[in-house]
Image: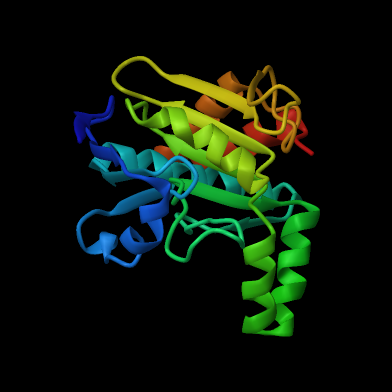
Amino acid sequence: MERSIGSMGSEYTRFRVDPEAVPLLAKLDWNSISRRVFIDPVGGLVALMTPSSKHERYAWGTGRLMDAVDRAGIPVVALGATRWRRPEDPENTGAEPDACYYLGDTAERWGQAYERGEAELEAFELHTPPSLVIEVERSAGDGDKPAFYRRLGVPEMWRLDIPGNTREAAMLDLQAPDGPAELASSTVLPPATPSFVLTALELAVRRRLGELDALIGTQEIH
């Protein structure tokens, strides 16, 4: 078992088990132990995370950033820290990203499923991965997540990290032919770049929403 503190002060615990034992472990109430839980049924990884206030502040900020994208005319459905798994994976396994979103056409199709009722909506979410997952904060346990989200079918992942006076961001094409690959700009929200997202995120966290809307408008994100 490994315990560590992330770059933004969150607490992490992780350990591995035989993948055959994962269905039994998944029946435990892990959320009574930790705020965020990642159970990878393929790799046998169980990772628990208790976020710091700074971590939560920036995870919340991604929501305000996406609200601005939505106001700019791009449909957005925010799904928070929804647990995601493949249909064939055991129940209660999967990952809870810091934030995730349906964007564009996928967001519109989510809305259509919503109108058809709860059963249709649950089926849609089970078979439709988010357009974008965002992980806030660098930690020793990050290595397995891109591969997991790739198997899930997620197109893109953002890794954001604001440990102190420094700020870092990376955009990953999760479905690149040779495995997750770093992008110069987003494919799901072009032409946004990592530096642009960091600037927009700071405005969002500080609630400078007028400036945020103006910044989004100058980029003509589509």
Where's residue 167, x and y in %?
41, 19
Q: Nearer the viewer, residue 152 or 189?
A: 152
Where's residue 77, x and y in %?
63, 58
Q: Residue at x 72, y 70 (%)?
A: 111
**Quadrant showing the C terminus:** top right
- Is residue 65 in sight in this rendering? yes
In the figure, residue 92 lies in which quadrant?
Answer: bottom left
Q: Residue at x 63, y 26 (%)?
A: 180
Q: Nearer the viewer, residue 213 or 184?
A: 184
**Quadrant showing the N terminus:** top left
Q: Residue at x 57, y 19 (%)?
A: 195
Is 124 positioned to the left or the right of 21 in the image? right
Residue 64 lies, with reference to residue 136, above or below; the image says: below
Where's residue 207, x and y in %?
43, 43
Q: Nearer the viewer, residue 164 or 22?
A: 22
- Is residue 203 in sight in this rendering? no
Q: How is the image coloured?
A: rainbow
Q: How many numbered markers are drawn?
A: 0
Residue 128 lies, with reference to residue 46, above or below; the image says: below
Where's residue 135, x and y in %?
46, 37
Q: Residue at x 45, y 19 (%)?
A: 168
